[in-house]
Amino acid sequence: MPEGDTVFRTARTLDQALHGELLTGCDLRVPAFATVDLAGERMHEVASRGKHLLMRVGEASLHSHLKMEGAWHLYRHGSRWQRPAFQARAVLETDDWVAVGFDLGLLEVLPLAREAERLASLGPDLLGADWDPDEAVRRIRSEPERPIAVALADQSNLAGLGNEYVNELCFLRGILPTRPVAAVTDVPALVALAHRLILANRDRNERTTTGNTRRGAQSWVYSRADQPCRRCGTRIESGSLGRNELELRNTFWCPRCQT
């Protein structure tokens, strides 16, 4: 599942291939921007902010979000794509590479000068150079009655955590996902752990929160409904949590280890 670490690695890989290169082809397959042609412009940088990916091309910012199913791939010219062409939402070409964005949940072209304004709602970026844990804590605590799992997943509080990290963090701190923020005694420690976890996974192809990278052993509770807790053996429970359909998330917890 794409989370902040996935987007960070994607941006780094794309930047290594495309940085400073002239685009020789540009095909944006979304109706609102289908007529935009950035061919002939130079790719200045590919960067991430939370779970958002930003390609700075000429005077434009090509802004994408992977959502649940999205991915960016790099191919040599003439090589076979790993996903079907009908899933492609953006195809960018240079002399050496073809970058393809598949099933992007969001794709838009902004004037570069408006990029910061477009992302102004985001909280501190866990993998950004300007990471500010105190500000993240302040934002989380600003709604004391909110369930802690919902607060952690809110990108306006801190940018980069997705549902997998949120569930795992609550387990590791022994906190029920439904516990109100006001009842979480050490929010700074929770935020610090979030930063350590995502930083530790930033350079891994396979994310792990258990320390074990073997497939099937990488998480404590996430996607493990009805399986035994790795610590106490109690059956992992699951449910949905969120204030509305837009923020509704699947939640997993151990009823013995988390209170």
Image (cartoon, rainbow, N blue to C red):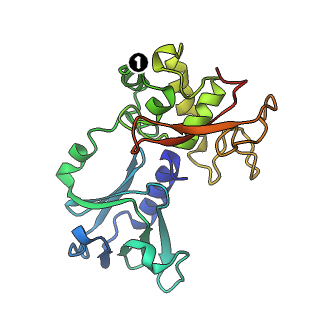
Total residue callouts: 1
Please state the horizontal and vertical placement of residue 219, each as a whole percent of the image. 69, 42
Please state the horizontal and vertical placement of residue 210, each as a whole percent of the image. 71, 38
Instruction: Check the picture and name the quadrant holding the C terminus.
Output: top right
The structure residue drawn at horizontal position 41% and vertical position 38%, both measured from the top left corner, is 159
Within the image, what quadrant is residue 88 found in? bottom left
Note whether 205 is above or below 50 in the view shown: below
User: Could you say which is closer to the camera, residue 87 or residue 35?
Assistant: 87
* Amino acid type, label 1: Pro
The structure residue drawn at horizontal position 46% and vertical position 61%, both measured from the top left corner, is 70
Q: Secondary structure at mark 1?
A: loop
Within the image, what quadrant is residue 166 found in? top right
Q: Which residue lies most toward the right here?
A: 233
The structure residue drawn at horizontal position 66% and vertical position 24%, both measured from the top left corner, is 258
User: Could you say which is closer to the camera, residue 199 or residue 250?
Assistant: 250
Note whether 112 is above or below 245 in the view shown: below
Residue 29 visible? The answer is yes
